[in-house]
Image: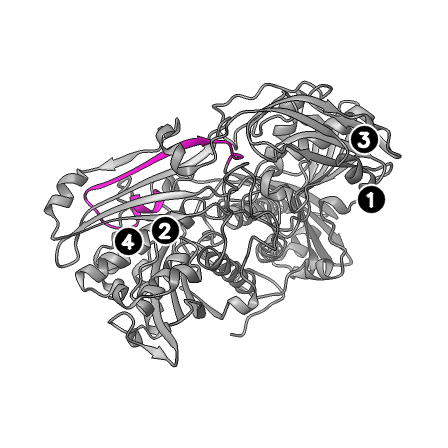
């Protein structure tokens, strides 16, 4: 491919911020130099439910360097939390240190502030708490009797599932379980917070800058104009940094109390208890189909947990409502209040977990029907979203499946499970379909042009964040394309609440929203230049600025969905293919190769896009291979509370991952034809692995992760 890498989107250029990162010059939240900085350490409860009856702070307060010990007894009174507010609404966190009540093991019950990080850590261990304990709800089976229907829209139906099942020639009724998982981005949650009179400044690792500023303003009841949040680089988030968490409020509370800037970094152990999680989901799928594979009914019932003080629902049935043409369909969600922290969005919330259940069930049904799993999916394709009757803006799912089958060598898949082997290894192939909503949200941007020595330099400003996905690079390419200048002449400034507002990073809306916002600003700048230049044959930005006799120009633009977008269902689609080898004796399995075929609009930068999909595939493999957070049954703490116990995939766990993008520019999705890919990459990956395991062994795996003790195949279990 002979591409001009000097400018424009679609080119696989290296990251423009890459050198800053590898040389350590890109500063993350805890790395900024701030005068008179002090350090804070959060203190965690050691019970899962009850009340604090006594706190002895004397020894900690007597330590050298200790500046303050804050507990519920002396903490600032904050705005009251409305339990009915959605976690991403205006007041988006549970205010901290406001009462003696303990809701879960590890909840913040205090804060120590000291001159050095080590002094704060040491003094925090010296505080003595006594509690009045109550019996916590920490057992999933015991809590099922308390399940309730969430207040937000959780149930959906069309047709009559019971009648559809009665009409079917073949039916399926199975339950699939995904465990608690934790996000664990490389960069710990952190903040350097400064309170100066009525003004707040925060360097904070946040995915959504405007939301963080709003949260701070609402919690402390101050004018949002007096809050500045900066997050130029975020070392991963996966949803855990969408909303400002309690550590943000703790640091600002402490800064206000002692009148000095405070740094607070959440430790890796605290990342298990103080930064949310992906909840455990128990999902029951029922499918009915005619003998030719035509679906007659599909239902998806999910039972999950939330905290006792806040509601969060992972919509596992999202995919089930829209992926296949099913006349009779129902989706329900139920929640159990438990003494664990509130779950929250984790990469592809709902889709990642729901697709494991749905795509595993579709594979099981294909086997029952004696149909090829790809043919079964194609048989039930639809170009209209059955959940709302809207046409898809584009849907190339069948093309993803067919092309993937060809590239992967699907014809070599053993038709009979447990029939292909290499030495002591059983070999199997698995497939799964994937979909992820591709949102496009209102985004504003500013572009500043400067003419120096017959060269135009452009600076783009927006409060968007780069969470490690390459936002700086694709935005530099966008400005380069629309202003027709080299990428090297574009500077991108992100992650500052003083810049024009964007929706922030999350939900796979970033690339489409940010790039179109940048496009709108560039188009406005060119329009302003042409207006100022008057009648001119000038075509380049340099010529326009000269004709307008300008050395500088600032322009702002806003992009947002139009009516055509709203009249369609806009999704990205894909297909995952996996080959696994399973040891006959030990149950140990190895992923030998993976292929992801994706249909996700215009690819702004193939190199960064490949990284997104590959990262998603690895994260999806983590769901299948190892990731699981275990609750200690007596005290409610997590047994898995470090990377020594919570395992994630490493290089030796993975094999080659190939990524193929179908050429597509969906101009209904937005003017640039971009769709999201960040969460498509993880969706249904775990199902493709579990389906491959079945093809290799004849043993159906419905409970993640697929550990060796579950994998050992007995002869009588093989199909």
For the record, the magenta segment spans 317-342
Q: Which residue is mark 3?
A: 60
Q: CA distance from mark 1 to mark 4?
A: 53 Å
Q: Is residue 72 visible?
A: yes
Going from N to C along the chain, the mark reached first, 3 or 4, is 3
Q: Which residue is mark 1?
A: 33
Q: Which class describes the residues within 10 Å of circle 1: few (<14), some (14-19), or many (20+)?
A: few
Judge whether 517 appears above or below 673 on screen. Answer: above
Q: Under tag 4, what secondary structure?
A: helix
* Rendered location of residue 154, percent (x, y): 35, 33
Q: CA distance from mark 3 to mark 4?
A: 56 Å
Q: Which class describes the residues within 10 Å of circle 3: few (<14), some (14-19), or many (20+)?
A: many
Going from N to C along the chain, the mark reached first, 4 or 2, is 2
Judge whether 563 appears above or below 149 on screen. Answer: below
Q: Which residue is mark 2?
A: 355
**Left or right: 85 in relation to 668:** right
Of badges 2 and 1, the one in the foreground is 2
Q: Under tag 3, what secondary structure?
A: helix
Residue 340 falls within the magenta-colored stretch: yes
Q: CA distance from mark 3 to mark 2?
A: 50 Å
Judge whether 623 appears above or below 692 on screen. Answer: above
Q: CA distance from mark 2 to mark 1?
A: 45 Å
* Rendered location of residue 570, percent (x, y): 38, 47
Mark number displayed over residue 361: 4
Of badges 1 and 4, the one in the foreground is 4
Residue at image position (21%, 58%) is: 379
């Amino acid at each position: 491919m002979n591409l001009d890498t000097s400018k424009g989107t679609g080119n696989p250029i290296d990251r423009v911020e890459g050198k800053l990162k590898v040389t350590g010059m890109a500063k993350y939240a805890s790395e900024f130099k701030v005068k008179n900085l002090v350090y804070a350490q959060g203190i965690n409860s050691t019970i899962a439910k009850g009340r604090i009856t006594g706190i002895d702070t004397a020894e900690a307060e007597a330590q050298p360097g200790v500046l303050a010990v804050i507990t519920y007894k002396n903490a600032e009174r904050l705005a009251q939390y409305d339990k009915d507010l959605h976690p991403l609404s205006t007041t988006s966190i549970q205010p901290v240190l406001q009462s003696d009540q303990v809701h879960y093991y590890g909840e913040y019950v205090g804060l120590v502030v000291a001159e050095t990080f080590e002094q704060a850590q040491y003094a925090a261990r010296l505080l003595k708490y006594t509690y009045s304990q109550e019996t916590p709800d920490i057992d999933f089976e015991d809590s099922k009797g308390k399940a309730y229907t969430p207040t937000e829209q959780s149930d959906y139906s069309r047709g009559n599932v019971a009648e559809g099942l009665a009409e079917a020639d073949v039916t399926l009724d199975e339950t699939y379980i995904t465990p608690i998982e934790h996000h664990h981005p490389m960069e710990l949650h952190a903040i350097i917070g400064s309170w100066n009179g009525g003004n707040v400044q925060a360097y904070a690792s946040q995915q959504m800058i405007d939301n963080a500023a709003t949260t701070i303003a609402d919690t402390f009841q101050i004018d949002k104009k007096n809050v500045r949040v900066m997050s130029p680089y975020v070392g991963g988030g996966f949803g855990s940094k969408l909303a400002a968490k309690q550590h943000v409020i703790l640091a600002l509370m402490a800064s206000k109390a002692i009148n000095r800037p405070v740094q607070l970094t959440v430790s890796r152990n605290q990342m298990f208890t103080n930064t949310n999680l992906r909840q455990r989901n128990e999902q029951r799928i029922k499918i009915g189909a005619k003998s030719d594979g035509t679906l007659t009914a599909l239902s998806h019932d999910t039972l999950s947990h939330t905290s006792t003080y806040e509601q969060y629902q992972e919509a596992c049935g999202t995919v089930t409502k829209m992926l296949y043409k099913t006349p009779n369909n129902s989706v329900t969600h139920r929640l159990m209040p438990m003494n664990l922290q509130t779950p929250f969005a984790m990469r592809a919330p709902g889709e990642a977990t729901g697709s494991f259940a749905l795509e595993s069930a579709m594979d099981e049904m294909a086997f029952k029907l004696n149909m090829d799993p790809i043919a079964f999916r194609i048989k039930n394709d639809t170009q209209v979203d059955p959940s709302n009757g809207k046409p898809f803006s584009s849907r190339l799912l069948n093309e993803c499946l067919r092309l993937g089958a060809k590239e992967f060598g699907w014809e070599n898949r053993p038709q009979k499970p447990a029939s292909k082997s290499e030495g002591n290894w059983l070999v199997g192939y698995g497939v799964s379909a994937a979909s992820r909503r591709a949102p496009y949200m209102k985004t504003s941007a500013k572009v500043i042009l400067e003419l120096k020595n017959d060269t135009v330099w452009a600076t783009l400003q927006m409060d968007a964040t780069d969470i490690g996905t390459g936002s700086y690079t694709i935005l530099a390419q966008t400005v380069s394309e629309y202003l027709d200048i080299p990428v090297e002449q574009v500077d991108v400034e992100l992650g500052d609440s003083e810049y024009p507002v964007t929706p922030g990073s999350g939900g796979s809306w970033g690339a489409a929203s940010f790039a179109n916002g940048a496009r709108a600003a560039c188009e406005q700048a060119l329009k302003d230049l042409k207006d100022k230049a008057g009648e001119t044959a000038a075509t380049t930005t340099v010529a326009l600025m000269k004709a307008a006799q300008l050395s500088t120009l600032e322009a702002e633009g806003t992009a947002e969905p139009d009516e055509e977008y709203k009249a369609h269902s806009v999704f990205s689609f894909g297909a995952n293919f996996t080959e696994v080898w399973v040891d006959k004796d030990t149950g140990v399995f190895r992923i030998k190769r993976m292929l992801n075929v994706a249909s996700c609009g215009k690819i702004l930068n193939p190199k960064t896009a490949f990284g997104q999909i590959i990262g998603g595939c690895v994260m999806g493999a983590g769901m299948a291979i190892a990731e699981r957070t275990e609750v200690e049954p007596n005290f409610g703490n997590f047994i898995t509370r470090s990377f020594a116990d919570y395992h994630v995939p490493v290089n030796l766990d993975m094999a080659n991952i190939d990524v193929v993008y179908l050429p597509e520019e969906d101009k209904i999705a937005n003017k640039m034809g971009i769709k999201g890919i960040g969460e498509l990459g993880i969706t249904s990956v775990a199902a493709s692995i579990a389906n491959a395991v079945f093809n290799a062994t004849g043993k159906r795996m419905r409970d993640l992760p697929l550990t060796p003790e579950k994998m050992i195949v007995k002869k009588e279990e093989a199909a």
